[in-house]
Image (cartoon, rainbow, N blue to C red):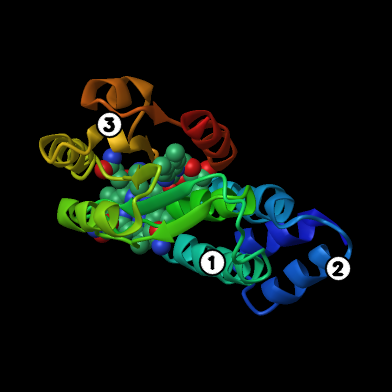
Amino acid sequence: MCIRKIASAVCEGNDDDIVALCSAALKSGMTPSYVIKEGLTAGMMEAGQLFDEGEYFLPEMLISSMTLQKGLDYLVDNMEKESPFWKGCVVIGTVAGDTHDIGKNLVGAMLQAAGFRVIDLGIDVPAERFMEAIETYKPDIIAMSALLSTTMMTMETVIRQITDSGLRDDVKIMIGGAVVNQRFADMIGADGYSANASRAVALAEQLVS
Ligand code: B12
């Protein structure tokens, strides 16, 4: 089983075969996190490259993302579910006004594969829902994703509400998404930023250590 087949299936939007390919990869001894990183993510990056070059348009990106999601759902279903040895709890979501979720889902899956309990609030998540989740799940980390320049400032709103509620010392905050960077993270008072899913795992481990 060659991991390239999974990357190509995502890039070409071949959603008929993606589950069988992911299943074959696991059976051949590959770990879910390896398949996510070198298969699904690599394929999505290739689709993104074609988009940037004007070869792909949004419909192709959507089909690639649906293929990725199908593979990701299968891999997450085949990971350890409950563990008394969680490294920590992460509440993750894409901020209000923003419906991009491919990167957020990859980060969530990689964190789960690395041993974190992940509560995914989904897309278009307002500050109030992050606040409710802090009360309910008492997470170690709030992880926010934004892909639009119009939604990135919502991250600051969430941090301000957490601070105003007196909960800022109880939770670490990490952010990501193509539109943000370390400078922005520093500016809004987040504890960390990472540019991709693997680094997000390293960052989360550092934040809970
Ligand atoms: C796919 C895509 C879509 C899909 C989304 C499908 C989905 N389910 O997510 C669809 C077609 C629906 C879409 C819609 C729109 N899109 Co769009 N989209 C993209 C595209 C092409 C790729 C994004 C992507 O998935 N990349 C692949 C993933 C793996 O990368 P990623 O998201 O960056 O995530 C990685 C890192 O950033 C990081 N990360 C991400 N989140 C987090 C969170 C944490 C906590 C951490 C630590 C790390 C982290 O790790 C991830 C994995 O490595 C980008 C262009 C681009 N090159 O980014 C435009 C782009 C983001 N979209 C754009 C726009 C404008 C839109 C629309 C407004 C278009 C329209 N006119 O309707 C709508 C917005 C709808 C809305 N309200 O949200 C613009 C944004 C411009 C801007 N600066 O604001 C972009 C940049 C395209 C462009 N060049 O104009 N889009």
Structural distance between the alpha carbons of marks 2 and 1: 20 Å
Q: Does the numbered disc 1 mark a residue whose Cβ is under 8 Å from ligand 1?
A: yes
Give yes or no for contact between labels 3 and 1 (Cβ–Cβ under 8 Å).
Answer: no
Q: Which mark is residue 27?
A: 2
* Residue drawn 25% across the image and 55% down it: 135
Q: Of residues 154 and 192, which is closer to you in this image?
A: 192
Q: Secondary structure at mark 3?
A: helix
Please tell me which of labels 3 and 2 falls first in the chain. 2
* Residue drawn 14% across the image and 40% down it: 157
Q: Position of residue 69 (x, y in %)?
A: 54, 66
Q: Amino acid at mark 3?
A: Asp
Give yes or no for contact between labels 2 and 1 (Cβ–Cβ under 8 Å).
Answer: no
Does residue 187 appear to the left or right of 86 in the view shown?
left
Q: Is residue 179 above or below residue 35?
A: above
Q: Secondary structure at mark 2?
A: helix
Structural distance between the alpha carbons of marks 3 and 2: 43 Å
| Residue designated by label 3 | 169
Structural distance between the alpha carbons of marks 3 and 1: 34 Å
Q: Which mark is residue 69?
A: 1
Q: Quick one: quadrant of the N terminus? A: bottom right
Q: Amino acid at mark 2?
A: Lys
Q: Is residue 12 above or below residue 52?
A: below
Badge 1 local density, few (<14 within 10 Å), some, or many (20+)? many
Badge 3 local density, few (<14 within 10 Å), some, or many (20+)? few
Does residue 72 appear to the left or right of 182 in the view shown?
right
Which of the two marks, 3 or 2, is nearer to us in this view? 3
Does residue 128 appear to the left or right of 99 in the view shown?
left
Q: Amino acid at mark 1?
A: Gln
Q: Residue furthest bottom?
A: 16
Q: Of residues 142 and 137, which is closer to you in this image?
A: 137
Q: Secondary structure at mark 1?
A: helix
Please tell me which of labels 2 and 1 falls first in the chain. 2
